[in-house]
Image (cartoon, rainbow, N blue to C red):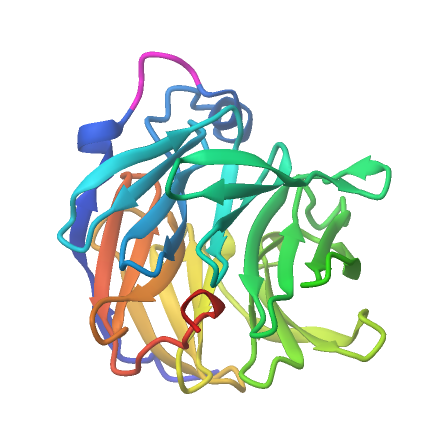
Amino acid sequence: MFAAPPVIETKLFVDVNTVHGIQDHPSEWAGLLFGRPNTPSFLEGPSFDRAGNLWLVDVARGRLFRVTPEGGVDIACEYEGEPNGLAFHKDGHGVIADHYHGLMRLDPATGTVEPLLVRNTNERFRGTNDLTYASNGDLYFTDQGTSDLIDRSGRVFCLRANGTLDLICDQLPSPNGLILNAEENILFVGLTRDNAIWRMRLNDNARADQVGRLIRLSGGTGPDGMAADAEGNILVCHVGLGAIWVFSPIGEPLYRINTCKGLATTNCAFGGPDNRTLYITESSSGCVLTAKLPTPGRMLFSHM
């Protein structure tokens, strides 16, 4: 349908597994999901704090890593959970989308993790996955669980800045990464098991409407984490294909970013002095990769 876009190559930034990989005790999460309980780590949720440190979560081991701009890696905290996504509030605290618990609050200064929102009214979440802030402090997040094309039980919620929880859309096959458009009236959601990016208009009644597919991917497993740049372009981590696609706001492919490691390109975040460097988690190798992009990333709520 489109000509092959220009390719941008990546390079290795840090290899977390070399220093912090664990294989001497099994991970229940990795065993159930992949059949590989001795997975040394599974990196996700890259997010920058205001000091320029890159934070990563390890779903398999319940750990959070802090990576300095120079590439030094330390374990910032460990807890009994399955952290899958991470976003920072502009006041400095982090919110973790934990597959097991729900939403958890991180104090980066002390490494303390405590419950923030673990229930939707009287039921627990099915498996929260990723999250993104709007400019007013509203927090959108996906509740993926084990949903797929047969079990369409996935959901998207919004935790408003005033504490109200709204169900934005339900009956979804594996909602994963998500990002708002520049005007914040459209929510783009990666549906992993549908191998597609869905477009949801946000109406005045909180619920999404005019929901449809914007982008149909091919090959791999499907879309995972997402990001946006300052021109409104959409970056999609295509897990299982080892690529990150850069699409225009109307869905035209602009660039393909190739991994220099494995195929599990799970998530990405803009950073660096000019905010033009894309940091990518490649989870099969336990590495973070970087790529230099022509357009800087969109300023996030955490840095406003």
**x 63%, y 56%: residue:** 141
Tell me which corner region of the image, top left, top right, bottom left or bottom right, holds residue 41: top left
Magenta-drawn stretch, dominant element (helix, strand or loop): loop
> Of residues 47 and 59, which is closer to you in this image?
47
Spot occupied by residue 231 in the image (x, y as percentages of width and height): 41, 87
In the current view of this chain or complex, which residue is farthest to the left?
70
| Quarter of the view holding residue 202 | bottom right
Q: Is 52 drawn above or below residue 32 in the view shown? A: below
Determine whether 173 is above or below 272 in the image: above
Q: Is residue 23 magenta?
A: yes
How many numbered marks appear?
0
Q: Give the quadrant of residue 257.
A: bottom left
Give the residue drawn at x 33%, y 67%. 270
Q: In front here: 198 or 177?
A: 177
Please say if 297 is above or below 110: below
Along the line of sight, which residue is nearer the eye, 32 or 170? 170
Q: Is residue 234 left or right of residue 188?
A: left
Seen at 56% across and 65% down, the residue is 133
Q: Quadrant of the C terminus?
A: bottom left
Give the extent of the magenta segment. 22-26
Residue at far top of view:
24
In the rendered view, does 294 fall on the left or right side of 102? Answer: left
Percent across and percent down for residue 139 are 62, 61
Residue 37 relative to residue 208: left or right: left
At a point 20% along the width and 54% down the height, the residue shown is 260
Measured along the vertical axis of the image, is residue 219 above or below residue 23? below
Does the segment drawn in magenta span residue 285? no
Q: Where is residue 92 in the image (x, y as percent from the top left)?
A: 44, 55
x and y, in percent, of residue 127 in the image: 65, 40
